[in-house]
Image (spheres, helix red, strand yellow):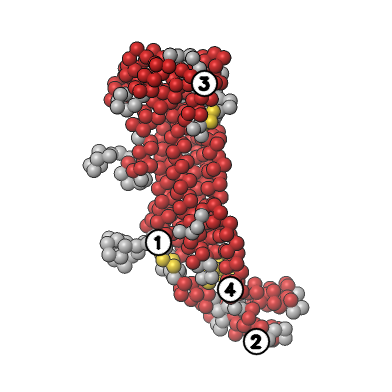
Amino acid sequence: MTSDTSSLFCPIEFRYGREEVRSVFSRAARLRRALHVEAALAAAEAELGMIPAADAEAIGHAATLERVSLARVDEIERSTRHDVMAITRALAEAAGPAGRWVHFGATSADVTETAMALELKESVEILSKDLEELGRVLVGLARTHRQTAQVGRTHGQHGVPISFGYKVAVAAAEVARHHRRLLELAPRLLVGKIAGAVGTGAGFGDRAQAVEERVMRSLGLAADEAPTQIVGRDRLAEFTNFLALLAATAERLATEVRNLQRTEIAEVAEPFDEERQVGSSTMAQKRNPVTSENITSLARLVRAFALPPLENMVQWHERDLANSANERIVLPHAIVLSDDILRKLLEVFAGLEVDPARMAEALRASGGAAMTENLLLGLTAKGLARAEAHELLRRLTRDAEAGPPLVERAKSDPSVRALLSAEEVDRLLDPASYVRAAAAKTDRILADLEKTFGPAA
């Protein structure tokens, strides 16, 4: 891509995504994969004695971008108005007399579907690596903060104490589940077909299965066990729904950072280049969580891309073209943006600024109210009915911000004093027990995750 972006139309070409991932979906890359499939087909047919070996070799030699140019393919397509016919004619020209064997017995979808599987194979490798790197960073962050006390929040309100490391370990476990999902769905996704016009393979005669097996083996793919003219679209729908799940997790984690970075909480902050980065053109003090917000925005778009592949599962008979146009848009965009989201999450968590003092301050500010569960259990253990203990604590924590902290209220309350000593109240309202429990569970989670992601980054 040139440095001049003035004529580019789609923001994904110049604003979002990595060049190395965008290049997977370039027109040149797609032509190269189609030629690779044609060469593999000719080689398989030669092995089975269906075409001359020398001609298959000539086809393989011609099936390169140096011999079959994108310009020539475009020129042919302008007259034929058929993309695969343009490729096969350009390849036949480049192969000379051997060109008569190009595409022998195949249909267009044999090439496009199998080439798409190669494209998806590269995509799965990229996303798998992204998830592994993100997982290692999260494991490392969780390990560092396994005992960093933080108030847990439910419904946006203070709950009971946790550790920040436990919060991050929960995120790492979710990422690990996505990694497993990707590996589990890959065998269903990475399939091609060399089975002819309606999937029966009749054009290859009694050697149809052998041809398909040889082609797929040479390309590192599996064959769709029951295709029509195309591979089953449930495979793509499963993949894009996986990407939607991944995007939902990404937005959840980005939203957590955004919330914890709010001025009134300020317990974490995403990386910010103090020397050069600008938060606002007007409010010079701003240090906005722009990367996390960007993740949120793109995640919503990736989830939207899950719908067309579901619609594409509905085909007329053995196939129609209602899926084709939108797949050319949906798959590259969903994959490029999914990678972009994961790399940005990696950037956020690798450089996340954590403020343990601010987290401890929030716990202190609760005045012990974050420990009501422990006090409830203590009172119940001493003989008070649970419902009565709950009502007592509800009364003691009413208007907590206006009066003394819970620890003082509890010690001065006759009902509490009758059952618990001042020392017992202090112990029950000490968050240390919760933090120790969170740290211990974090350790158990991380020990398992390191089997998936390897040592922490």
Mark 4 vs 2, N-terminal side: 4
Q: What is the three-letter code of the residue carrying label 3?
A: Val
Residue 364: x, y in percent? Answer: 52, 78
Sequence-wise first label, 4 or 1: 1
Q: Residues within 10 Å of mark 4 (few under 14, many from 20)?
A: many
Marks 4 and 3, how far apart in space? Answer: 68 Å
Mark 4 touches mark 3? (CB < 8 Å):
no
Neighbour class for label 2 at 10 Å: few (<14), some, many (≥20)? some
Query: Looking at the image, is mark 4 or mark 3 earlier in the sequence?
Result: 3
Q: Nearer the viewer, residue 254 or 189?
A: 189
Residue 94, given in percent of the width and then of the height, sits at: 32, 19
Above or below, 292 relative to 202: below
**Disc 3 target residue:** 211
Q: How many marks?
A: 4
Q: Residue at x 38, y 36 (%)?
A: 25
- Mark 2 and mark 3 in contact? Answer it, CB < 8 Å: no
Q: Which mark is nearer the camera, 2 or 1?
A: 1
- Of circles 2 and 3, which is in front? 3
- As helix, strand or loop, the secondary structure at mark 2 comes to helix
The label on residue 351 is 1
Q: Quadrant of the C terminus?
A: bottom left
Q: Nearer the viewer, mark 4 or mark 3?
A: 3
- Residue beneath label 4, please? 370
Q: Which residue is mark 2?
A: 422
